[in-house]
């Protein structure tokens, strides 16, 4: 079984380049089928979630070419009227963006219910409410398909009951080609909402206010082709920032938008790290054991839920007691049992983790329970004394491009292996590196 073998103890040092944002790419690749001409999308990360959405687009008749590792050219001119449903689609969350895209363009969508990490209930009632407000009828029919259709969509005034990234993006897509004006209030403000709006505008859409909580959309007749480059991944960047701090390292993270990282940077500075920002990079230096703090996850620009496991791992090594409150997803502390195997001292009460900092973690065999928690456990293992094995890494591969390779380039002893022979070789190479 594929897993990572890791020898902890080396501080991460050097420079690492961040890929394009997975969650922005999922939305933008889906929206690309709304154009009547081919669309070129650059800086797409090479991760399994992206391959799944591209597979779905091909399955329904999208013509896809892939001129280089990070570029896709998509022509959605010949999309077929058939359900979007296969095993890969059912595993990812972002497949729900094909509902908004297909409904917006063809006034009809039949898409398998979204999957994604098991971090909570993850309902789609706000997406459905938005589609209905635009005039669609929506029902969930067997075997787990969402069917949305309308004679034609008509702009509307929609107030979101919860701040939802997915629903905001889906409603933007559906409203882009609707007749008349749409206003979305209490919209999500995440960088990938803005990126999606910029992408659609570059194809001729008329979307204003993305990045604020009121988004105004004037429906247009059609969308033309474009060339667009996806923003850097805020969460991949944050993961490397926090891994640098957990290993008492010194890492410059390049190809980032420092503004998107502000709340992550602020927490690092608060607990005693040095963070040096430049135009498109941040350098994180951690020279000593860090201090404790409290954190609550919130919609952007608050502390992202997708960085909650990473900061908990870091605070697990800090002095004193920290409190981490998860306010977005109710089931996002499953990794705590795995961290306990490494010596983490965390007690979970409801949506709150009370973390007693320990001096160091100890290597152990652990399982990634989801994407971000998997990355956080890797960072714990890199900081630990001794060897660890991290299993269920297919979760990690959903969202991190070349994760072990990038960590190795920073001096981390980590390898992806699939059997005991490969594991032995990897361990030997780690020991050679330390001796050498
Ligand atoms: C997206 C991200 C995910 C991130 C999350 C929050 C993608 C593919 N995934 O997920 O990585 O953790 O944003 O930043 O971009 N909710 C409802 N009804 C709905 C929709 C959401 O009650 O119809 C609730 C959710 O249960 C959750 C909260 O709203 O408590 C936020 O969810 P949302 O922002 O929609 O997350 P996702 O789009 O699923």
Image: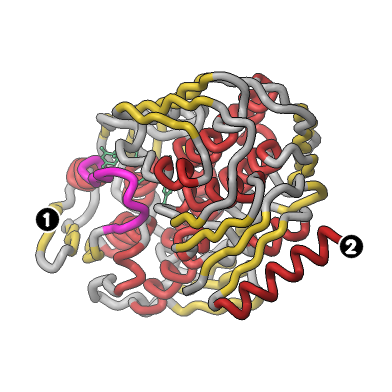
- The picture places residue 436, in percent across and down from the top left corner, at 89, 62
Residue 414 position by quadrant? bottom right
- 145 vs 425: above or below: above
- The picture places residue 54, in percent across and down from the top left corner, at 45, 71
Residue 318 position by quadrant? top right
Q: Quadrant of ligand 1?
A: top left
Residue 343 seen from this side? yes
Q: Residue at x 27, y 72 (%)?
A: 85
- The picture places residue 22, in percent across and down from the top left corner, at 52, 55
Work out whether mark 2 precedes mark 1 in sequence or the reverse, and give the earlier one: 1
The magenta segment is 114-126
Q: CA distance from mark 2 to mark 1?
A: 63 Å
Indicate left or right for 311 with 402 as reference.
Answer: left
Residue tagged 2: 436
Q: Residue at x 51, y 22 (%)?
A: 322
- 367 vs 426: above or below: above
- 104 vs 266: above or below: below
Callout 2: 10 Å neighbours few (<14), some, many (20+)? few
Instruction: Find the residue positioned furthest to the right.
Output: 436
Residue 112 position by quadrant? bottom left
In front of the other: 20 or 276? 276
Callout 1: 10 Å neighbours few (<14), some, many (20+)? few
Q: How many marks?
A: 2
Task: Give yes or no for residue 122 being in the magenta stretch.
Answer: yes
Q: Is mark 2 within 8 Å of ligand 1?
A: no
Residue 227 seen from this side? no
For mark 1, give the secondary structure.
strand
Residue tagged 1: 139
In front of the other: 395 or 188? 395
- The picture places residue 198, in percent across and down from the top left corner, at 54, 46
Indicate left or right for 393 with 234 as reference.
Answer: left
Task: Give yes or no for residue 142 being in the magenta stretch.
Answer: no
């Amino acid at each position: 079984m594929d897993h990572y073998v890791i020898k902890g103890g080396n501080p991460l040092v050097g420079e690492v380049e961040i890929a394009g944002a997975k969650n922005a790419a999922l939305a933008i690749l889906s929206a690309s089928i709304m154009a009547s001409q081919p669309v070129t999308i650059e800086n797409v990360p090479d991760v399994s979630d992206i391959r799944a959405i591209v597979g779905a687009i091909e399955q329904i008749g999208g013509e896809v070419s892939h001129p280089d590792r990070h570029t896709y050219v998509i022509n959605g001119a010949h999309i077929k009227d058939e359900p979007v449903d296969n095993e890969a689609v059912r595993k990812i969350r972002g497949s729900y963006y094909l509902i908004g895209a297909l409904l917006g363009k063809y006034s009809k969508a039949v898409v398998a219910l979204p999957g994604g990490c098991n971090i909570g209930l993850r309902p789609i009632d706000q997406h459905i409410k938005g589609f209905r407000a635009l005039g669609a009828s929506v029902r969930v029919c067997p075997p787990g398909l969402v069917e949305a259709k309308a004679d034609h969509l008509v702009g509307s005034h929609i107030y979101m009951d919860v701040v939802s990234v997915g629903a905001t993006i889906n409603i933007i897509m559906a409203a882009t080609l609707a007749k008349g004006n749409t206003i979305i209030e209490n919209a999500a403000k995440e960088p990938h909402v803005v990126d999606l709006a910029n992408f659609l505008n570059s194809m001729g859409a008329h979307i204003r206010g993305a990045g604020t909580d009121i988004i105004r959309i004037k429906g247009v007749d059609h969308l033309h082709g474009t060339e667009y480059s996806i923003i850097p991944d805020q969460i991949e960047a944050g993961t490397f920032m926090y891994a640098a701090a957990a290993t008492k390292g010194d890492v410059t993270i390049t190809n980032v938008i420092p503004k998107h990282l502000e709340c992550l940077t602020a927490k690092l500075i608060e607990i005693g790290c040095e963070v040096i920002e430049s135009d498109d990079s941040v350098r994180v230096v951690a020279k000593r054991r860090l201090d404790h703090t409290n954190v609550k996850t919130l919609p952007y620009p608050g502390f992202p839920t997708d960085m909650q496991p990473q900061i908990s791992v870091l605070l697990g090594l800090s002095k004193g007691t920290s409190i981490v409150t998860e306010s977005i997803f109710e089931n996002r502390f499953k990794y705590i049992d795995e961290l306990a195997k490494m010596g983490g001292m965390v007690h979970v009460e409801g949506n709150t983790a009370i973390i007693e900092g320990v001096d160091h973690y100890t290597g152990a065999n652990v399982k990634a329970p989801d994407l971000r928690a998997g990355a956080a456990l890797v960072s714990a293992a890199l900081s630990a004394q001794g060897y660890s094995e991290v299993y269920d890494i297919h979760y990690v591969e959903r969202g991190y491009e070349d994760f072990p390779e990038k960590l190795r380039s920073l001096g981390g002893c980590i390898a992806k292996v699939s059997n005991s022979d490969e594991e032995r070789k990897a361990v030997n190479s780690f020991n050679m590196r330390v001796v050498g």
